Image (cartoon, rainbow, N blue to C red):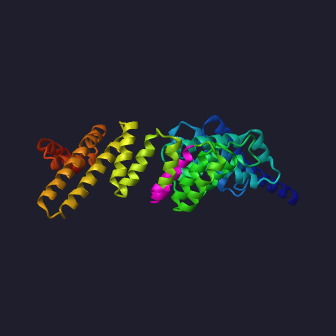
Amino acid sequence: MKKYLLLIAVLAVSLGTYAQKGKVTSALSMIEQGNLDKAKEALDQAMVDEKSKDWFNTYFAKGKLCQAVFKTDNQSFKKLCGADPLGEAYAAYEKAMELDPKGTVKKRIIANMIYNSLALDLYNQGGDQFEAKDFEGALKSFETQIKITESDEFAGAVDTGMYYNAGLAAINSHKYEKAIDYFNKCAEMQYMGITPYYQMYESYLGLGDTLKAEATLKSLPEKFPDDKTITLQLIDLYIKSGKNDEALKYLKVAKEADPTNYSLYFAEGIIYLNSNQYDQAIENLQKSIELKSDLYDSQYGLGAAYINKASDMFAKANDIMDVNKYNAAIDEAMTVFAKALPYMERANELIPDDVYALRGLRELYYRLRMTDKYDAVKAKLDQIEQQ
């Protein structure tokens, strides 16, 4: 009699265990059928039951569910696995393998290329997040993709582009050290040529480390001897760093190699303009306009150079005690002001609502006593600045 009762007890336990594990099996079937809400209900029950909450198949089913939630078009199912269903899917698959000492889940993941599918889903999710400017979310997706593709469970070749994608997401989310690591990986794999080095350079600037930024650029001529953009990047760095002498040195080299590049003359002109060397600024900005006449920056820059030079001439004229010499100096300054007018008007034509060009014109029209034009520009500027 006691043996009979014991047998009944064993059967009861076995049937209870089977019942809970049966919910997992049912959940997997419902996932295949697209009944994700019912699958979630079954898994929720299995997750809290002592007999199935630590069963590897329970977590495998959760992984399948969360991956299906990401792919579904049914909006009512989208919240069944939280804000990051693919992240939850990956964590669930990893937990399933951890709980499976015999490795049956791992074999299933490899045989069915589940991690290949998950990596592709993460790539697509990361791309969507990046487009939506959710750079931190994109970084998380791309980093999970990298973990998967570097694992033993991934059946396929490693996609080098995923490191570049992760680097872009990192630099856009201001995680510059991570960005440097990913771009350095791309450089080691010779992916996208010189581009990853420029991204590392930008990352070092983001960290405020101009020395490493400079060192990165200076290492490039040996690696890419035919690339002309390296010099331009060095010029840009030196201008941003206020190292005008270094910038001018590299500008000279760049102009010798590419004498018809308007941007080089513009850059040199702005350096001289910012250091109040107006004649040199005017010479270079005029050359920039000769090479490309429809650039606002060059037109405005040349106009500003003439205005600043004329203003300095006015200030110096005020120190002249002799009336005749004073009047001559004022007339000369007015002539320089007049030279600024066509360039500032052209800048205004190129960008009609730009306040800087309008302010320049307001001063010129006032100085040159062009009353009607002064009133019109002042009214337009007042309207823009009040918005």
Q: Is residue 208 magenta?
A: no
Q: Position of residue 113 (x, y in %)?
A: 73, 39
Q: Is residue 307 left or right of residue 248?
A: left
**Residue in view at x 20 percent, y 57 percent:** 314
- Residue beneath the point at 76% across and 50% down: 15
The answer to which image quadrant residue 37 occupies is top right
Q: Quadrant of residue 349?
A: top left
Q: Is residue 356 visible?
A: yes
Which residue appears at 16% of the width and 58% of the height?
A: 325
- Residue 39: % across, % down: 62, 43
* Residue 172 at least partly seen: no
Q: Nearer the viewer, residue 350 or 292?
A: 292
Q: Is residue 230 magenta?
A: yes
Task: Give percent across and percent down for residue 100.
Answer: 78, 53
Image quadrant occupied by the N terminus = bottom right
Marks counted in the figure total 0
x, y (%) of residue 270?
38, 51
- Span of residues in magenta: 228-246
